[in-house]
Image (spheres, rainbow, N blue to C red):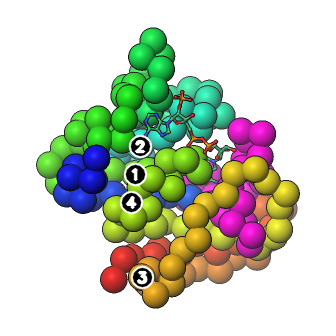
Amino acid sequence: MTDTLITKKLSIVVAVSSNNAIGKGNELLWYLSADLKHFKNITTGHTIIMGRKTYESIGKPLPNRRSIVITHNKDYKIEGAEVVHSLNDALDLLGENEEGFIIGGAQIYNQVLPFCNKIYLTTVHHHFDADAFFPEIDRKVWKETEKAEHKADERNEFDYTFSTLEKM
Ligand SMILES: NC(=O)c1ccc[n+]([C@@H]2O[C@H](COP(=O)([O-])OP(=O)(O)OC[C@H]3O[C@@H](n4cnc5c(N)ncnc54)[C@H](OP(=O)(O)O)[C@@H]3O)[C@@H](O)[C@H]2O)c1
């Protein structure tokens, strides 16, 4: 598996809470209008790769993006998305120098984090009860290269920070 993984340009896009939570009951934990826009800006026009559960929590292929969904289920079919049965198969669909955007969820993040070069990280400054978590980010390995802090407002219930982390 690792051969393809280490040769690809992979970026994670994720929103985590202060306690590393990313979801519960196969849903997101918050509604932050600014983060949805941020996600759209980062991923539009690109290839997004996700696990089957994340796909089902979104419910449809996102517009103006190429969607690749990973499942073990050989009968799984989605109109408007490509379905594959391993991470390697997903990465094989990427163009030679194409940046692939890994959009979750926990199972997929856990498998790809060691092979990613960049994390587009949204931190939501609140603790949540959750059943899906992002793996611990080793700050000795990952350096923050961009950071923008934002206060809660009428469209965003919690304080949040957009950052970019790059592997040193
Ligand atoms: N906050 C965020 O930024 C964010 C982003 C994305 C998702 N989420 C949240 O994360 C949660 C979902 O995460 P999750 O870990 O439960 O599920 P997931 O990673 O989205 O999907 C897991 C599924 O992917 C398939 N899969 C995983 N690894 C595979 C492999 N190596 N080969 C083939 N298939 C593989 C399996 O599908 P089959 O069972 O069909 O075989 C597995 O059940 C939800 O709560 C969602 O809202 C949060």
> For mark 2, what is the residue?
48
Instruction: Name the quadrant where ligand 1 sits.
Output: top right
Check whether the beta carbons of the residues at disc 1 and disc 2 lie within 8 A of each other. Answer: yes
> For mark 3, what is the residue?
141
- Given residues 96 and 132, the one toward you in this image is 132
Check whether the beta carbons of the residues at disc 4 and disc 1 lie within 8 A of each other. Answer: yes
Q: Give the range drawn in magenta.
A: 15-40
Kind of residue at disc 4: Ser
Vertical order, 102 against 75 (above or below)? below
Q: Distance between the residues labelled 1 and 2?
A: 5 Å
Whether residue 132 is visible? yes
Q: Indicate which label's residue lies in the foreground, 4 or 3.
A: 3
Q: Distance between the residues labelled 4 and 3?
A: 15 Å
On the rendered structure, is 17 left or right of 166? right
Q: Which mark is residue 11?
A: 4
Vertical order, 11 against 63 (above or below)? below
Residue in view at x 58 percent, y 79 percent: 148
